[in-house]
């Protein structure tokens, strides 16, 4: 007599198994998409903060350098203690050794520098927004003269102070 085997081989998946696997796959895909979106947001934020920092550092470094090498500050043509500030310096051109005027101001939400009658040069990137530029004139009696520069770019504030040469 032949015995019939009651065990059958499982040749496929049940509907319940397919639903569980599909749910797990959807969960993994959703987690990966969320991770990629978060990483993208972080990278965009870092790129924006870097642009703000680089623009501020570039502008402040240039202001400090020009103030340090300036002969005098044109107080009448400069605008101090208010936004937008304007700073007009008299410097010596290193190539011709002739006196020249250097003007820092704001144009189109960006810090500019103009030497003499030359073209405007932008010191800040067009990717950032300048919301505050203030120059403060600091004197110590009649000898020392300094400029404190305060600027706010992208909601972050930056400061520097520089003393005119031969004024200390």
Image: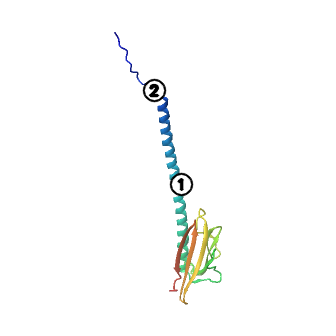
Residue 75 position in % (x across, y down): 62, 83
Residue 104 position in % (x across, y down): 61, 75
For residue 12, the mark is 2
How many C-alpha atoms fall within 10 Å of the one at disc 2: few (<14), some, or many (≥20)? few
- Residue 115 vs residue 159, the one in the foreground: 159
- Outermost residue, bottom direction? 142
Left or right placement of residue 107 versus residue 30 in this view = right
Residue 168 position in % (x across, y down): 50, 86
Residue for point 49% across, 46% down: 31
Residue for point 60% across, 80% down: 89
Secondary structure found at label 1: helix
For residue 41, the mark is 1
Residue 36 position in % (x across, y down): 51, 49
- Residue 114 vs residue 98, the one in the foreground: 114
- Residue 155 vs residue 97, the one in the foreground: 155
How many C-alpha atoms fall within 10 Å of the one at disc 1: few (<14), some, or many (≥20)? few
Are the two marked residues, 1 and 2, in contact with CB atoms closer than 8 angstroms?
no
Q: From what the image shows, is residue 21 above or below residue 92?
A: above
Residue for point 55% across, 60% down: 48
- Count all numbered tags in the image, as a single digit: 2
- Residue 153 vs residue 22, the one in the foreground: 22
**Quarter occupied by residue 3:** top left
């Amino acid at each position: 007599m032949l015995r019939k085997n009651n065990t059958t081989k499982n040749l496929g998946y049940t509907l319940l198994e397919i639903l569980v696997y599909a749910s797990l796959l959807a969960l993994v895909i959703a987690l990966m998409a969320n991770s990629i979106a978060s990483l993208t947001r972080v990278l965009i934020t870092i790129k924006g903060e870097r642009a703000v920092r680089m623009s501020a550092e570039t502008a402040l470094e240039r202001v400090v350098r020009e103030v340090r090498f300036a002969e005098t500050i044109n107080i009448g043509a400069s605008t101090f203690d208010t936004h937008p500030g304007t700073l007009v310096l008299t410097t010596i051109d290193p190539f011709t050794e002739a006196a020249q005027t250097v003007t820092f101001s704001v144009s189109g939400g960006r810090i500019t520098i103009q030497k003499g009658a030359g073209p405007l040069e932008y010191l800040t990137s067009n990717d950032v927004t300048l919301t505050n530029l203030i120059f403060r004139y600091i004197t110590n009696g009649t000898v020392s003269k300094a400029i404190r520069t305060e600027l706010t770019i992208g909601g972050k504030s930056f400061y520097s102070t520089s003393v005119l040469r031969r004024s200390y």
